Image (tube, helix red, strand yellow):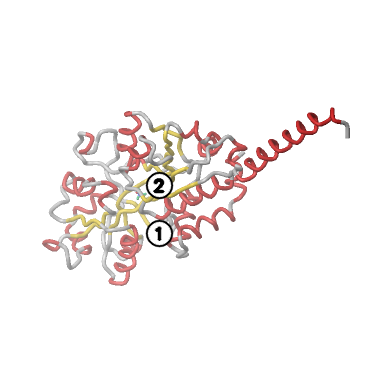
């Protein structure tokens, strides 16, 4: 070997070693390929089934793109401030009726971006299983004025009812505060009805089963999309919602809930730190039947939220892979 070749050989070796180091870094951090940070995308979980399953569905989609994900259990009102300041990265189920006000407040302060709506529209309101009317327990429903009839209200009393009033079982108070008790009073129903808050979504479904077994009427808070879609549940027709009709917005409270959006939101830095994941999340849109199915895997089929998400992803590859392209 000629002495004069040494610098060339050393040069080639150095270039090969540098190339190998770059290759290996790229190999174990696949997110690099897309330009996304390896910092975890923080996804919140709340206390109703579709939201938790969808958290793992979206987390699974991000992971398939090479991203890191972490999950944090968060209060469903306070989460918008957490996203605004960057402690949480996204929200994938902003329900207009329950959370629209908290969402607007955080967006207006700056730091939280509206990332578009799902295809599904939403309704969050009081309603009843259809057998309540089939059994003649409250003729005239779903028109709310049927609730003014004392012969209706008496069929909804429970042992804990004050003065024998009919009971309405609202969801956890963190969802809507005093919205429903205020409405009951505003509509002049307070002498016949009282509102109890359930501790969890599961307590609502347990109430449906208990009332049917006991043959008494029941009115619970429920929503769509949910596993109860198409399963014989009817929402009560209250006077229509109009902007500003709620006491929290300065109104008299004599109104039902809106035909609402189901929105997505992100921290403002997300499109910079994770451009590929942010682009995929922007495209994500789930339908009423897709979201109902996510809830049913847990509430009907009794799967864990994580297993439900894995099954949903396995059964719907063509749906979600389109979001990542
Ligand atoms: C926010 N929720 C779906 C429980 O109404």
Which sits in the foreground, 176 or 230? 176
- Read off the residue under disc 2: 44
Point out the residue furthest to the bottom here: 213
> Which quadrant is the C terminus positioned in?
top right
The kind of secondary structure element at disc 1 is loop
Q: Is mark 1 within 8 Å of ligand 1?
A: no
| Closer mark to the observer between disc 2 and disc 1 | 2
Using the rendered view, name the quadrant where residue 245 is placed. Answer: top left
Find out whether the residues at labels 2 and 1 contact each other: C-beta distance under 8 Å: no
Q: Residues within 10 Å of mark 1 (few under 14, many from 20)?
A: few
Specify which label sits upstream in the sequence, 2 or 1.
2
Q: Is residue 321 left or right of residue 211?
A: right
Residue at the image point whose x is 36% and y is 53% from the top: 47
Q: Residues within 10 Å of mark 2 (few under 14, many from 20)?
A: many
Residue at the image point whose x is 38% and y is 31% from the top: 111
Point out the residue furthest to the right here: 1
> Which quadrant is the N terminus positioned in?
top right
Which sits in the foreground, 38 or 291? 38
Where is residue 323? Give x, y as percent.
57, 41
In whole angstroms, how far apart are the C-alphas of marks 2 and 1?
31 Å
Where is residue 86? Give x, y as percent.
39, 37
**322 versus 231 height, above or below:** above
The kind of secondary structure element at disc 2 is strand
Which sits in the foreground, 255 or 35? 35
Q: Is residue 308 left or right of residue 47?
A: right
Q: Is residue 96 left or right of residue 43?
A: left
- Read off the residue under disc 1: 232
Where is residue 290? Give x, y as percent.
51, 50
């Amino acid at each position: 070997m000629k002495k004069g070749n040494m610098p060339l050989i050393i040069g080639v070796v150095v270039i090969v070693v540098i190339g190998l180091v770059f290759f290996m870094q790229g190999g174990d951090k696949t997110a690099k390929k897309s330009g996304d940070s390896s910092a975890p995308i923080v996804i919140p979980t709340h206390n109703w089934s579709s939201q938790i399953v969808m958290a793992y569905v979206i987390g699974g989609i991000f992971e398939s793109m090479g991203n890191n994900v972490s999950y944090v259990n968060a209060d469903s009102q306070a989460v918008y401030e957490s996203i605004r300041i960057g402690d949480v990265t996204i929200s994938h189920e902003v329900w207009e009726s329950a959370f629209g006000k908290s969402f607007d407040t955080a967006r207006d302060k700056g730091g939280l971006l509206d990332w578009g709506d799902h295809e599904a529209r939403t309704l969050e309101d009081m309603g009843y299983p259809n057998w309540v009317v089939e059994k003649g327990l409250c003729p005239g429903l779903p028109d709310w004025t049927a609730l003014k009839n004392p012969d209706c209200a008496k069929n909804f009393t429970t042992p804990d009812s004050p003065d024998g009033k009919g009971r309405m079982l609202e969801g956890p108070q963190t969802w809507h505060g005093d919205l429903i008790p205020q409405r009951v009073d505003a509509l002049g129903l307070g002498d016949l009805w009282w509102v109890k808050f359930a501790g969890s979504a599961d307590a609502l479904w347990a109430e449906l089963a208990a009332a049917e077994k006991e043959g008494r009427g029941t009115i619970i808070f429920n929503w769509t999309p949910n596993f109860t879609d198409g399963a014989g549940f009817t929402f009560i027709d209250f006077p229509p919602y109009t902007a500003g009709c709620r006491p929290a917005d300065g109104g008299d409270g004599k109104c039902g809930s809106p035909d609402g959006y189901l929105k997505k939101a992100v921290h403002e830095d997300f499109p910079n730190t994770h451009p590929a994941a942010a682009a995929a999340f922007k495209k994500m849109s789930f339908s009423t039947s897709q979201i109902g199915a996510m809830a049913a895997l847990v509430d009907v089929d009794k799967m864990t939220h994580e297993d439900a998400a894995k099954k949903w992803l396995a059964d719907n590859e063509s749906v979600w892979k389109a979001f990542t392209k």
